[in-house]
Amino acid sequence: MGTEGDTYRVIAGRYRLEARLGRGGMGVVWRATDQLLGRRVAVKELPQDDTLSEADARRRRDRTLREARAVAQLRHPHIIVVHDVVEHDERPYIVMELIDGGSLADRISAHGPVDAPEAARIGADLLSALRAAHAAGVLHRDIKPANVLVEAGTGRVVLTDFGIAQVAGSTTLTETGSFVGSPEYTAPERMSGTRTGPEADLWSLGVLLCTALSGESPFRRDSLGGILHAVVVDEIRPPAQAAPLLPVVRGLLERDPERRLGAAEAERLLRTFRETGRTPRATAPHPPTEQDVPVRRTPAPARSRRGVLPVALLVAALVGAGVSAALLVEREGGNGRTASSSSASGSSASGTPASGTPASRTPAVTPPSGYRVARDPAGFALAVPDGFTRVRQGERVFYLSSGETFRLGIKVTAADPGGPLVVLRRQADRGPDDNPGYRDGTVTATTHRGLPAARWEFTWNGFSTAEGARHTYDLCWEENGRTYDVWVSAPVGRVREAKEYFDVAVDTFTGT
């Protein structure tokens, strides 16, 4: 089966398979005719697993048919319509609407990346589709450009290929005990083998947006191990083309699923950008419930089949070696206020740079929507939020929001003989003196653009009762004989906004 010689065979006494449209790991898709209703359809022929016993094969077919019928209950303009689910010669088939048009992957390959407004349109429509699927208890689990169709003439975006979808409370449509999905688009929590929910689909959509805007996934590497490391550990660096949509991309590519931007809010932000050309701030941020430190997760049981190494086992080995699926950072240490003595630092996503940028290169300052480029007379440039005002205090420069709710600090000094880690450890030792109520302080060695760096994160009580508890993110690194220290301080209830400001500051920072 699945050869050109099978053309024009009829399955289930009704569907005539006429031409093969494509083949993938989840089966063969045929252009077909529904002879009963006289309409064109697409038919997916799901593969068989010859290693299964007859009883196991039957259970798998039954499960596939049962869960495919659940997917068929979904009704949404941006979800492929499933007309029928049938079995023929003990093989399951899914009969779907035939979309006249190629995939988003085909479009990118033929015409290059899309612009920000088009990416926002595609992303918003897909988020709407995912909201409907998740509300019905269906997880897609393989969001990627190849599984998004763009209808010719209308431009309608259609999410397809729920071939490895999972219905809540059940196993997967094609579960075989090994990893399923596309590693470049797979969320860290799935990589680590932990139980995952709708948030994993949202991560994948964040990767898809990056790919649509730049033409390549930010997690593309030359090997599976490299991809795994990039997804789970490396510093996440969205492409420069994502700048207009950075609040959404950053929110969706949050390694901690509990902090990840929700579907409804992400859709709202993208549609607002489409209407106004500007991306508003995300609302209802998640307050910090615990330190964002490396979390060891127990991998789900997995077994190798046909010599395939299950991804969960490889990630488990990485985690056992001290690699974490959720690495965030922050810090203050007196840097959070213009009237304090010592400088503070905060943390950023850690790990080696995703692009392997050489130490001699610095990124161009490209401000996202809602930001401006600040070319500071102290000898650096970075993107700061619109409306932030500059204040100089000694060696430190601050960019402050109205009322000093958010405080972005920068300090540039000569390189310290002990390196960034020693610099931040000294400041952390002074944390209780410089920051009232200092607690949960963590200093960790990392890299930034391939350079030695350290990160610091902590919570403290603020400088007054009225100000209230605050959280700080800090990154310190060495470059060209200088030590750069960048941090952001904010109320504990507004850490999502603070993290965005911090990430943008670090990502766009360049010495001048």
Image (cartoon, rainbow, N blue to C red):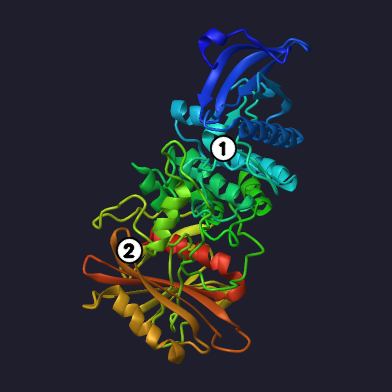
- Amino acid type for the residue under numbered disc 2: Thr
**Which residue, given by chain and number where applicable, does mark 2 sit on?**
447
Horizontally, is 141 left or right of 365 in the view? right
Q: Residue drawn 49% across and 55% down?
A: 192
- Which comes before the other along the chain, label 1 or label 2? 1
Label 1 secondary element? helix
**Which residue, given by chain and number where applicable, does mark 1 sit on?**
118
Horizontally, is 122 left or right of 454 in the view? right
The location of residue 349, given as percent across then percent down, is 43, 62
The location of residue 352, given as percent across then percent down, is 34, 58
Horizontally, is 405 left or right of 58 in the view? left
Query: Can the viewer see residue 495?
Result: yes
> Mark 2, residues whose alpha carbon is within 10 Å: few (<14), some, or many (≥20)?
many
> Mark 1, residues whose alpha carbon is within 10 Å: few (<14), some, or many (≥20)?
some
Query: Can the viewer see residue 374?
Result: no
Foreground disc of the pair 1, 2: 2
- Work out whether residue 103 or residue 14 is closer to the camera in this orientation and state it: 14
Q: Residue drawn 68% across and 40% down?
A: 129
Q: Is residue 489 above or below residue 188?
A: below
The location of residue 112, given as percent across then percent down, is 44, 31
Q: CA distance from mark 1 to mark 2?
A: 34 Å
The location of residue 264, given as percent across then percent down, is 68, 51
